[in-house]
Image: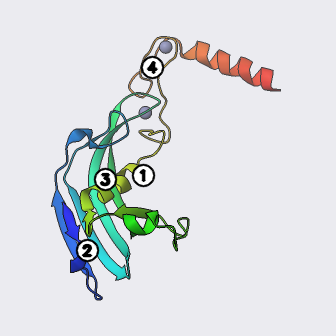
Amino acid sequence: MFIDTNKISEKGLIVSNSFSLDEDMLIEENAFFLDDLKYYVLFNRDGDRIQAKGNIKTVISLRCVKCLDDFELNIDLNFDIILFPVNLVNSESNSISLDEMEYIFYDDNRVDLIKILLEQVNLFIPYDPICKSDCKGICPNCGTNLNHAKCKCENSSKELNFLFNKIKR
Ligand SMILES: [Zn+2]
Ligand SMILES: [Zn+2]
């Protein structure tokens, strides 16, 4: 879905809608959309620079790195980014300091809205997703998911911790 940048007037342009996305559009492995992506974006123009401020709501499924269970993550994120035209970035008289804000490029007077929204969702996903802060993980000995059940190795892992703490001292 593309936004024609010529339609962004001095007063700005608001776009708001929702759409469904393919499951494989997230970078994170084993991550997929469980709901439509709902968005609200306000575009403002400052010469060739376009500011995009908005909000994204959706639900995704992630796999916990500790217990390997899938869990739901509710996403309700705000973003504020600047879009630059590709030709301005490539020109030698480069007036942009790229570290001033987050930036994304657009080309041929069109902004790829889905690409922008997906990038924001991908940035939002934690590097090591964990289902809950007190996730007990998997027993390294027998593979039992310790969130759901206890295993007989529990004592031995305590012993290991005890030994480990001793070594640290
Ligand atoms: Zn977990
Ligand atoms: Zn075990």
Residue named by callout 4: 150
Residue 81 shows in this picture: no
How packed mark 2 is, by other alpha carbons closer than 10 Å (few <14, some 14-19, many 20 or more), is some
Question: Residue tagged by mark 1?
Answer: 123
First in sequence: mark 3 or mark 2? 2
Separation of marks 3 and 2 at Cα, in angstroms: 19 Å
Task: Specify few, some or many for label 3: CA neighbours under 10 Å numbering under 14, 14-19, or 20 or more.
Answer: some
Kind of residue at disc 1: Leu
The span from disc 4 to disc 3 (Cα, nearest Å) is 39 Å
Q: Is residue 31 above or below residue 150?
A: below
**Taking 10 as reference, is 37 above or below it?**
above
Q: Earlier in the sequence, mark 3 or mark 1?
A: 3
Q: Which mark is residue 5?
A: 2
Q: Secondary structure at mark 2?
A: helix
Amino acid bearing label 4:
Lys
Mark in the foreground, 3 or 2: 2
State the residue at coordinates (38%, 64%): 86
Separation (CA) of disc 2 from disc 4: 58 Å
Name the image quarter holding residue 154. top right
